[in-house]
Image: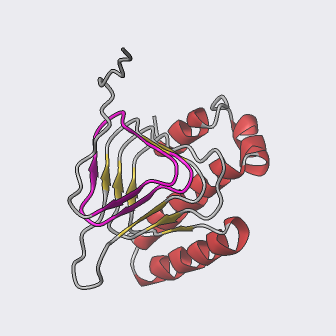
């Protein structure tokens, strides 16, 4: 299954051509993922491709108020339920089937050190989460709303962690 079909399936639609077209018009999260896929494809195609990627990135900023770098690596099945004010830097690596809500920022912490976050598969980043620097998020981890994670800060939440009450 291609990344396009996985993104379409993550947006809750079946992978037929007609439903893909309707989802592209009606679902802004899927449209944002399509714009990213086009820019990511174009940036690897030489000088003309980089020009096209720049134009697609500018369109993402104008239409969705989001900046997803074409040089970021986002796995298949990404889901943007509320695509607004999302910023993903150029060195960010995101695994498959990740859900990213609005206001999430993923980028480097300092200008002189180019280290970016690494997000595992099936992770969820809730509203306003900010991950800067060499932050590694494991598979299936959920990062809460308005969480700020810097540098080598360990991820406290694990998918197998249990909350017990006395």
Q: Is residue 140 above or below residue 63?
A: above
* Residue 19 highlighted magenta (yes or no): no
What residue lies at 33% left-to-right and 72% top-to-bottom? Answer: 108
Tell me the quarter of the image containing the C terminus. Answer: top left
Residue bounds of the magenta highlight: 126-150
Observer-nearest of 40 and 149: 149
What residue lies at 45% left-to-right and 37% top-to-bottom? Answer: 97
Q: Is residue 159 above or below residue 67?
A: above
Observer-nearest of 100 and 148: 148
Residue 12 x, y percent position in the rendering: 65, 31
Task: Tell me the colour scheme of the image.
Answer: secondary structure
Residue 77 x, y percent position in the rendering: 49, 40
**Secondary structure mostly taken by the magenta-highlighted segment of the chain:** loop
Residue 122 x, y percent position in the rendering: 40, 35
What residue lies at 35% left-to-right and 45% top-to-bottom? Answer: 95
Left or right of 111 on screen, residue 126: right
Tell me the quarter of the image containing the N terminus. Answer: top left
């Amino acid at each position: 299954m291609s990344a396009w079909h996985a993104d379409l399936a993550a947006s809750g639609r079946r992978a037929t051509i007609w439903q893909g077209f309707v989802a592209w018009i009606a679902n802004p999260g899927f449209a944002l993922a399509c714009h990213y896929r086009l820019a990511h494809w174009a940036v690897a195609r030489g000088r003309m491709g980089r020009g096209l990627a720049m134009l697609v990135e500018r369109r993402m900023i104008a239409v969705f108020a989001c900046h997803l770098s074409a040089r970021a690596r986002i796995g298949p099945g990404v889901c943007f339920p509320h695509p607004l004010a999302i910023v993903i830097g150029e060195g960010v690596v995101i695994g498959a089937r990740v859900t990213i809500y609005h206001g999430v920022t993923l980028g480097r912490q300092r200008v002189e050190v180019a280290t970016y976050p690494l997000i595992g598969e099936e992770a969820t980043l809730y509203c306003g989460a900010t991950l800067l620097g060499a932050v590694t998020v494991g598979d299936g981890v959920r990062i809460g709303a308005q969480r700020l994670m810097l540098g080598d800060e360990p991820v406290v939440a694990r998918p197998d962690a249990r909350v017990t009450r006395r």
